[in-house]
Amino acid sequence: MTGMRFTPKGYGGHRRNPDEVKRDGWREQGVLAVAMDDHRLTWPERELVRQLGEKLYGTAIGGREVQR
């Protein structure tokens, strides 16, 4: 039985990096995972992420400040 797969996607073989996992989560399930200090975001975008996180889940551990 060659070519049959007995493990779910993401198990064994190629390991996806964290950005691939986040991208696939967004595209496949509509789930967005964003780090407050992601260098690709502008300050207003990081601030929006922080505010959304606090609204949904409360203050981050230790009230972590965003790196600028």
Image (tube, rainbow, N blue to C red):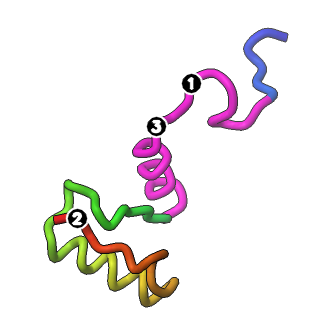
What residue would you read off at disc 2? 67
Task: Point out residue 4 in the picture as x, y percentages from the top left corner.
Answer: 78, 20
Tag 1 residue: 14
**Residue 26 or residue 65, whichever sits in front:** 65
Query: Given the current orientation, which residue lies at the most extreme bottom position?
Result: 55
- On the picture, is 6 further left or further right than 14? right
Q: Earlier in the sequence, mark 1 or mark 2?
A: 1
Residue at left offset 77%, top offset 31%: 7
Q: Nearer the viewer, mark 2 or mark 3?
A: 2
Q: Position of residue 14 (x, y in %)?
A: 56, 24
Instruction: Pick out the residue farthest to the top.
Output: 2
Residue topped by disc 3: 17
Q: Is residue 39 above or below residue 7?
A: below
* Discs 1/2, front: 2
Residue occupying the point 20% across, 55% down: 40
> Label 2 sits on what residue type?
Gln
Element type at marker 2? loop
Task: Give the image quarter of residue 50.
Answer: bottom left
- Mark toward the start of the polypeptide (2 vs 3): 3
Residue at position x 54%, y 60% in the image: 29
- What is the quadrant of the N terminus in the image? top right
- What's the magenta region? 7-30
**The C terminus lies in quadrant:** bottom left
Three-letter code for the amino acid on which mark 1 is drawn: His
